[in-house]
Image (tube, grey):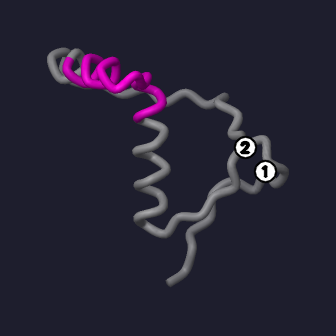
Amino acid sequence: MEKKTARLTLLIDPAKKRAFEQLCAEQDLTPSQVVRQMIRDYLHQHGVEYEPSGTGDSAGSSRGGS
């Protein structure tokens, strides 16, 4: 399991934030869960490999070659 120790702060339109939070609630998910999944998907889509925190190696992210 990943340690969740880093914080990501972003600015978003208030109406978009409300709609996102409502959709997350309807799907019984937290906004944080959805954002973490989107980040994992984005990294995977772009071939970025990383070692999740708390799983041993603390080397961080590395760019996978293709």
Give the image location of residue 48, x and y in percent.
53, 64
Quarter location, residue 20: top left
Residue drawn at point x = 34 percent, y = 18 percent: 25
The residue under label 2 is: 53
The total of numbered circles placed on residues is 2
Magenta: main secondary structure equals helix
- Magenta residues span 19-34
**Residue 58, labelled with which disc?**
1
Extreme front residue here? Answer: 27
- Given the image, on which type of amino acid does mark 2 rest? Ser
Give the image location of residue 4, x and y in percent.
64, 30
Quarter location, residue 59: bottom right
Give the image location of residue 31, x and y in percent.
40, 25
**Image-based side of 23 in relation to 52, left or right:** left
Give the image location of residue 40, x and y in percent.
49, 50
**Image-based side of 7 in relation to 21, left or right:** right
Report helix, strand or loop for mark 1: loop
Q: CA distance from mark 1 to mark 2?
A: 7 Å
Residue drawn at point x = 78 percent, y = 50 percent: 58
Extreme bottom residue here? Answer: 66
Residue 23 inside the magenta-drawn segment = yes
**Image-based side of 20 in relation to 15, left or right:** right
Instruction: Verify CB contact (< 8 Å) between mark 1 and mark 2.
Output: yes
